[in-house]
């Protein structure tokens, strides 16, 4: 990169840190820090939601899907549209009212309201673990982008630099800093993709005729996807809209139910088709460029890391100045997800875990300080975890799978089923999440050399275990209580 590109990039990063420190002065309580004073508008929240959900991991991950399978990779974010709109219709009317009435900060507080403190504690632990993993995936996405585009920067140093920037402005600024920087970051990303990335990449590879001649026909088809891949995406991504801590924080941060529902409809439309097709198209263009031998030192496109195709494409084709702008665009996406996930994990640990074990009441000032320290600590741990992983999308989907298999069934039961029982919720969460983690680690292998179908994700089986456990135990306790009466 040229000095001008570095200058643009550094100015951008300093601006993001500046937003964080600006809101550091504005935050006077933990309510300001975690739910932005509960007075945010639909457009700020909607753009923040899509920036968080699509973010860097899906931006880099979608590029990887476009590189390996073409425009059919866009179907992954179609599940995001479905999830956003379903939660707007069924979840927000119940959660928004409860959040404002009881001054909730976190998702597990819903479990405390409907079930018990014990169930809420387990939910907080599951959510915190999942979001630490998700934060790590975003830091890894940023590091991959940085190491591919900045000369002489290796992946480990990139992890430290990217992680430090995201952690510092989130720790000092809280959710309001996150939402405002998300809005800025998302606008920069869209402008960068629409006006810089896609047009220049399209021309650099030679236009449509060259794309069609270089790629296999299935790359330009929307049917280049298997039924089980669609099922895996749907089961992993749609439920996250009902259990995502980052999403509950934004529901609580909205002025009212109407603003929250509008924000979710906005987010769904931007996820698919807008962000979905932009991501996979750039990934496809990277595949064309790699196949044509446009990347220095890469002679075999099929042998390279598919998630590195997009950042290498950008570093190869963009002229001085535009490289800095486009790099800032992608780092925008990455930071917008990393900061939100970091806030989610921090909120779970402080509100749902530390507060449960502490025997003394903290002042608002002390609680704010604890929140900032925990956010900083979680961020450091996420950077260390990211240093041990290789694939962004895989790490993201593992984190999603663990949370979904543990939390999805109990939250539906709490909101929509009168027979729901705290004991059933606790064991459903524990067995569902444990099943998924066990199967991920074993590659869907069971004892006695028995294997489950490898083309189905582990969380499908985890959710099944969670559902069966929840129904059986809820019915048992319902009948027991009624017979007792």
Image: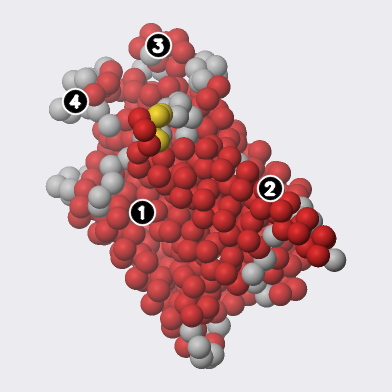
User: How far separated are the C-alphas under marks 2 and 4?
Assistant: 54 Å
Q: Nearer the viewer, mark 1 or mark 3?
A: 1
Q: Residue at x 53, y 48 (%)?
A: 432
Residue 230 shown left or right of residue 206 in the figure: right
Image mark for residue 471: 2
Dots 1, 2 in contact, CB < 8 A: no
Measure the alpha-carbon separation of dots 1 and 3.
34 Å
**Residue 60 vertical placement versus 65 (above, below):** below
> Closer to the N terminus: mark 1 or mark 4?
1
Q: Mark 4 and mark 1 in contact (Cβ < 8 Å)?
A: no
Percent of width and height locating residue 345: 46, 64
Identify the residue at horizontal 76%, vertical 48% (top origin). Answer: 89
31 or 361: nearer the viewer: 361
Answer whether residue 21 is visible to the viewer in this image: no
For residue 339, which quarter of the picture? bottom left
Q: Is residue 26 left or right of residue 308?
A: right
Q: Position of residue 403 (x, y in %)?
A: 51, 51
* Among numbered discs 1 and 2, the one appearing first in the sequence: 1
**Residue 465: percent from left, percent from top:** 56, 43
Label located before the other in sequence (1 or 3): 1
Residue at label 4? 298
Asked if marks 4 and 3 touch (Cβ < 8 Å), the reply is no
Occupied quadrant, residue 201 = top left
Of discs 1 and 4, which sits in the foreground? 1
Q: CA distance from mark 1 to mark 4?
A: 28 Å
Q: Residue at x 70, y 44 (%)?
A: 85
The residue at which mark 1 appears reads as: 136
Alpha carbons under labels 4 and 3: distance apart: 20 Å
**Of marks 1 and 2, the one in the foreground:** 2
Q: State whether residue 132 appears in this view.
A: yes
Badge 4 element: loop
């Amino acid at each position: 990169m040229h000095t001008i590109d570095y200058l643009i990039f550094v100015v951008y990063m300093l601006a993001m840190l500046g937003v964080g420190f600006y809101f550091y002065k504005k935050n006077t309580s933990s309510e300001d820090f975690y739910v932005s004073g509960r007075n945010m508008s639909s457009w700020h929240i909607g753009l923040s939601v899509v920036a968080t959900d699509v973010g860097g991991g899906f931006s880099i991950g979608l590029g990887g899907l476009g590189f390996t399978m073409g425009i059919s990779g866009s179907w992954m974010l179609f599940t995001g549209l479905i999830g956003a709109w379903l939660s707007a219709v069924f979840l927000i009317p119940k959660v928004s009212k409860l959040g404002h009435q009881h001054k909730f900060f976190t998702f597990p507080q819903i479990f405390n309201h409907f079930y018990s403190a014990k169930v809420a504690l387990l939910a907080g632990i599951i959510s915190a673990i999942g979001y630490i993993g998700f934060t790590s995936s975003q830091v890894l996405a940023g590091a991959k982008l940085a190491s591919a585009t900045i000369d002489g920067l290796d992946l480990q140093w990139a992890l430290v630099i990217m992680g430090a920037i995201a952690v510092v402005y989130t720790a000092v600024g809280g959710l309001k800093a996150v939402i405002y920087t998300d809005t800025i970051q998302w606008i920069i990303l869209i402008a960068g993709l629409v006006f810089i990335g896609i047009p220049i990449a399209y021309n650099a590879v030679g236009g449509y005729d060259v794309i069609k001649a270089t790629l296999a026909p299935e790359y330009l088809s929307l049917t280049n996807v298997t039924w089980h891949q669609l099922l895996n995406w749907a089961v992993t991504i749609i439920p996250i809209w009902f259990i995502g801590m980052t999403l509950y924080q934004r529901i609580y941060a909205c002025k009212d139910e109407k603003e929250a529902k509008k924000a979710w409809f906005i987010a769904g439309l931007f996820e698919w088709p807008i962000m979905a097709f932009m991501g996979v198209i750039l990934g496809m263009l990277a595949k064309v460029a790699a196949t044509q031998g446009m990347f220095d030192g890469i002679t075999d496109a099929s042998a390279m890391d598919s998630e590195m195709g997009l950042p290498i494409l950008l570093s190869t084709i963009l002229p001085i100045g535009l490289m800095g702008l486009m790099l800032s665009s992608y780092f925008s996406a990455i930071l917008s997800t990393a900061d939100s996930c970091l806030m989610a994990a921090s909120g779970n640990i402080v509100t749902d875990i530390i507060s449960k074990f502490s025997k003394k009441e903290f002042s608002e000032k002390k609680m704010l300080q604890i929140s900032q320290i925990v956010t900083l600590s979680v961020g450091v741990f996420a950077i260390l975890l990211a240093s041990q992983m290789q694939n962004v999308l895989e790490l993201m989907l593992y984190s999603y799978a663990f949370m979904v298999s543990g939390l999805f069934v109990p939250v539906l039961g709490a909101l929509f089923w009168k027979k729901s029982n705290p004991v059933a919720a606790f064991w459903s969460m524990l067995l569902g999440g444990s099943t998924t983690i066990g199967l991920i680690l074993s590659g869907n292998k069971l004892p006695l050399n028995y294997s489950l179908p490898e083309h189905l994700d582990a969380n499908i089986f985890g959710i099944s275990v969670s559902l069966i456990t929840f129904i059986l135990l809820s019915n048992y306790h319902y009948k027991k209580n009624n017979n007792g009466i």
